[in-house]
Image (tube, helix red, strand yellow):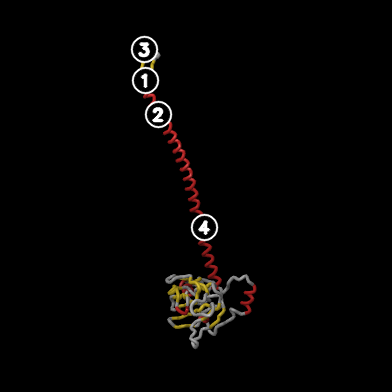
Amino acid sequence: MKGKYYIVQIIPEDSKEIKKYRVNTKWFFLLKVLLVLLVIAAGFVIYNAGRIGRTLVQYEKMRTANAQLIKQNANYEELFFRIDSLWVLEERIQNILGTFIENDSGKINSLIDKNRFAHTPSQKIDVDYEGIHGWKPPEEKIRLEHIPNVIPVVGIVSKKFSEENDHLGTDFSAQIGDPVFASGSGIVEFAGQKDELGNTVIINHENGYVTSYSHLKDIRTRKGRTVGKGEIIGTVGKTGNTSGPHLHYTITKNGKELDPEVFINY
């Protein structure tokens, strides 16, 4: 290829003079290579531009879908929160009213036959409920919330309070796993294992009253937590020194043991 030339002639329209140029063949070869490289580069740019365009479209779709998922998740969380609130409220109302849901007619008849709520203690704590359907001062409502007068478990009294027999509480026989409720609002002073009493929760009601719930299977609260009247704090079990599943429940006022049945509104 070396030493070879092309003759390029340029003939102007208004002139008879012909211009001739000698061009080495190597320049034509370089021009071909340059054109090939330009075509390859243009194809590469076009291909990557297409990929970037598709990526941007997919990104926009993903961003829109992600925003929708975030919104749906927020809606689900709000619904779950409402459901949990309704469930807690339902259980508190059922417990405060001394009722529970049961579809087994045989069990209902059995409870009726045993006259489960017929017991009336010899004395009762006098609580003034006058005006309960009307307005009550907030201080009075708070005071009533902190009085431990709600039955702590749906069960049968199997052993009564007796100072003579050194049984300073009331035992409620119930099935393992049945919910145990806080009998009044207060702060959890203790939640854990307590020697022969097994799993125990102790609540300070901030008015001199302290209640304890022992032999629990599960503890569903923790020390330092504020609990409301009727709130689930554990389940019935047989931990510690006991022959069967039951709840050992105690009430003290300024350190003195009291008969829990005096307080419970059956």
Kind of residue at badge 1: Lys
The label shown at residue 17 is: 3
- Residue 67, percent from left and from top: 48, 50
Give the residue drawn at x 36%, y 16%. 20
The label shown at residue 141 is: none
- Residue 179, percent from left and from top: 53, 72
Kind of residue at badge 4: Tyr
Circle 1 residue: 4
CB contact under 8 Å: marks 2 and 3: no
Give the residue drawn at x 54%, y 75%. 153
- Disc 4 to disc 1, C-alpha distance: 82 Å
Indicate the secondary structure of the residue bearing disc 1: loop
- Residue 103, percent from left and from top: 62, 70
In the displayed structure, 28 sits above or below 126; it is above
- Disc 2 to disc 4, C-alpha distance: 63 Å
How packed mark 2 is, by other alpha carbons closer than 10 Å (few <14, some 14-19, many 20 or more), is: few
Circle 4 residue: 76
- Disc 1 to disc 2, C-alpha distance: 18 Å
Indicate the secondary structure of the residue bearing disc 3: loop
- Residue 261, percent from left and from top: 52, 81
- Disc 1 to disc 3, C-alpha distance: 25 Å
Circle 2 residue: 33
Indicate the secondary structure of the residue bearing disc 4: helix
